[in-house]
Amino acid sequence: MNELIKTFKQKDGSVAVDGRDLHDFLEVETPYRIWIQRMIEYGFTENVDFAGFEQKSTKPQGGRPQVNHASILDCIVL
């Protein structure tokens, strides 16, 4: 079976997807930071359904770290 979106296995054995990859795959027009907050408001629980983590900025002059999320597949309903 071909993978539509990249997944990865977490330390606890659950399968997850990168939040920004999911956002891009779904072609959501709302900016990621707003979209993910809306998803959290639906009742997803941090460190159960998803985990947040910071990534270094890709901007050459630095800036704030970019916050990303790993969401387990069990909480994603397409």
Image: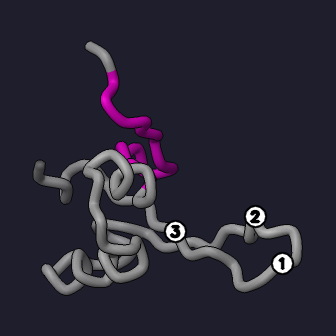
What are the residue bounds of the magenta stretch? 3-18
Q: Name the residue under label 2.
A: 58
Q: Name the residue under label 3.
A: 68
Say whether marks 3 and 1 touch (CB < 8 Å): no
Q: Position of residue 64 (x, y in %)?
A: 71, 85
Q: In which quarter of the image is residue 61?
A: bottom right
Q: Which residue is drawn at 33% across and 25% down?
A: 3
Queried whether the magenta region covers residue 9, the answer comes back as yes
Q: Where is residue 8 in the image (x, y as percent from the top left)?
A: 46, 40
Q: Mark 1 points at which residue?
A: 62
Queried whether the magenta region covers residue 71, the answer comes back as no
Q: Residue furthest right?
A: 61
Q: Which residue lies furthest to the top in this view?
A: 1
Element under disc 3: strand
Nearest the viewer among 36 and 28 is 28
Q: Which residue is drawn at 11% across and 48% down?
A: 78
Q: How crowded is mark 1: few (under 14 residues within 10 Å), some or many (20 or more)?
A: few
Q: Which amino acid does label 2 sit on?
A: Thr
Element under disc 1: loop
